[in-house]
Image (spheres, rainbow, N blue to C red):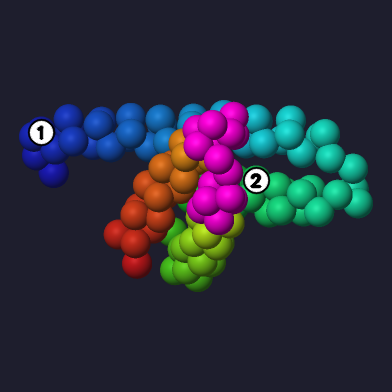
Amino acid sequence: MSLACIPLLAQTSLEIQERIAAQQDLIRVLSKDLARYTPASPQGPQLRAFIDVLEEQSRLLQQPREQWPAKTVQEQFKAITMQLGNLRNQAANYRPSHPELSRIRVIIDLLDGELRSLQHAK
């Protein structure tokens, strides 16, 4: 490895740290949202599944890409694709002035980036 690679590695590492931080922030927000729901609420399991997907993605990002288990990558790809579909359907049902719409768009952008990352790992 040459010294020319060091800035690229630092940039990649910084990018990954930023992605992990964004995911952890989102997990905290979603966990607070989850606390508002009763166990019988249908939103509870959906939100819990979404949090689980984000937590698993954060765990993956903390490992070198070469160490990502292929089965885990495939499962994450399917899980994120499903969550994206749910969020896009939810966003499509909102009026443009709905207060949650901007938050959902930010989450969709985050998940789109994670999906692209997983596609490169396949």
Let me know if residue 63 appears in the view: no
The residue positioned 34% from the left and 54% from the top of the image is 116
Give the x, y percent position of residue 37.
84, 40
Alpha-carbon neighbours of circle 2 within 10 Å: few (<14), some, or many (≥20)? many
Q: Is residue 93 magenta?
A: yes
Q: Is residue 99 magenta?
A: yes
Quarter containing the C terminus: bottom left
- What's the magenta region? 87-102
| Foreground of the two, 33 or 96 | 96
Residue at 90 percent across and 48 percent down: it is 39
Where is residue 31 shown, x and y percent of the image? 72, 35
Q: Is residue 44 left or right of residue 91?
A: right
Q: Which residue occupies 41% across, 42% down?
A: 109
Q: Position of residue 99 (x, y in %)?
A: 59, 29
Q: Which kind of residue does numbered mark 1 sit on? A: Leu
Q: Secondary structure at mark 2?
A: helix
The alpha-carbon separation of the residues under discs 1 and 2 comes to 39 Å
Q: Which comes sooner in the sequence, label 1 or label 2? A: 1
Per the rendering, the mark at residue 59 is none
Instruction: Residue at 13% x, 44% y: name it.
Output: 1
The three-letter amino acid code for the residue at tag 2 is: Ile
The residue labelled by disc 1 is 3
Query: Which residue lies under the disc numbered 2?
Result: 51
In the rendered image, the vertical position of residue 27 relative to residue 111, given as above or below: above
Give the foreground label among 1 and 2: 2
Height in image: 91 above or below 16? below
